[in-house]
Amino acid sequence: MDGNGRWAELRRRPRTFGHLRGARIARETIEACAELGIENLTLYAFSTENWLRPLEEVSFLMALLSRHLRRERETLIKNNIRFRAIGELDRLPASVRAEVDKTIADTAHCTGLLLTFALSYGGRQDLVEATRQIALKVAAGELDPLQIDENCVAAHLATAGQPDPDLVIRTSGESRLSNFLLWQNAYAEFLVLPTLWPDFSREKLLEALAWYSQRERRFGKVSSHAESPATV
C-alpha cells in the first residue's frame, strides 16, 4: 500500500493526511475483498525498514493502527473476517500489540476472509527466523537435515498454513517487492499500478482481478496452449 506520503505532498498537506486517507482505502479494500469472496488478503502495513522513518511519523502510524483496530473489530466480526498479524510483533509498542492480540482473539471464530496484516515484517527476516528454528531442531536432534525441503522451510515461515499469494498488487508505480514475502511470492503474478494508494478503489481492485483472470498460471511448466512438438 504505497504512496500515502507522496499523495499528501502533491496536495501540499502533511504526510499524516495521506496515511489517514490510506487507512480509509484499506478498510474499503478489505470490505470489497470480503464481498467478492476472496479467501486470503495480506496487507503490507508496516515493514521492518519503516522503523527508520522519522519518529513522529512512526508514532503517528502506530497510533493510527491502534485506533483503527479498536474501531473496526466489530465490523470485522460482522463481516466474518478473521484477523491475524505476521512480523516482529514484539517491536510494536505495548498498547498497539495489545490491540493486535485482542483483534486476533476476538475474530478467531470467523470463517470468511483471512485478513493478514504484515506488521514490522520483512521477508529476509522471515527467512532468517525460519532458518534459525530449523537449525535449533537439527541441533536438538528433532530434525534430520535430509528432511529439510521446501515444505519444511514453508512450515517455519510466518505464513505457515496459508497458501502462497496468487496476485501481488503494488501501487505507486514502484517495481520492487520491498522485502515482502520473498519466499512466498516465487510464483505470484505481479501487477504494478501507477496509482498512489490513497487513490486506489474498488474499481481498481476489480480491474486488477480482471487482469489476473487473464493470466496463464504455468508454474514453470509448458503452456497448455502451446502447440505440440512436431513428430520426428
Image: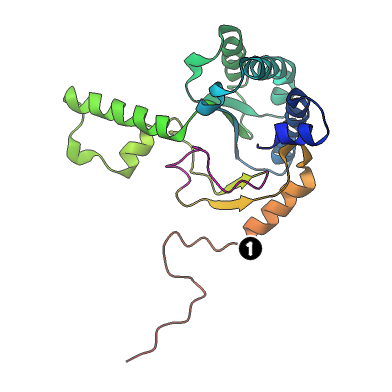
Q: Quadrant of residue 13?
A: top right
Residue 132 in percent (x, y) is at 29, 26
Mark 1 crowd level (few <14, some 14–19, many ≥20, 10 Å Cα): few
Residue sitting at x 52%, y 60%: 217
Residue sitting at x 60%, y 7%: 95
Q: Amino acid at mark 1?
A: Gln
Q: Which residue is mark 1?
A: 214
Q: Residue furthest bottom?
A: 232
Decide if residue 69 is on the left or right side of residue 153.
Answer: right
Residue 63 in percent (x, y) is at 68, 14
Residue 30 in percent (x, y) is at 70, 34
Residue sitting at x 58%, y 49%: 175
- Magenta range: 172-185
Decide if residue 176 is on the left or right side of residue 113.
Answer: left
- Residue 115 to residue 66: above or below: below
Residue sitting at x 62%, y 18%: 58
Screen quadrant of the C terminus: bottom left
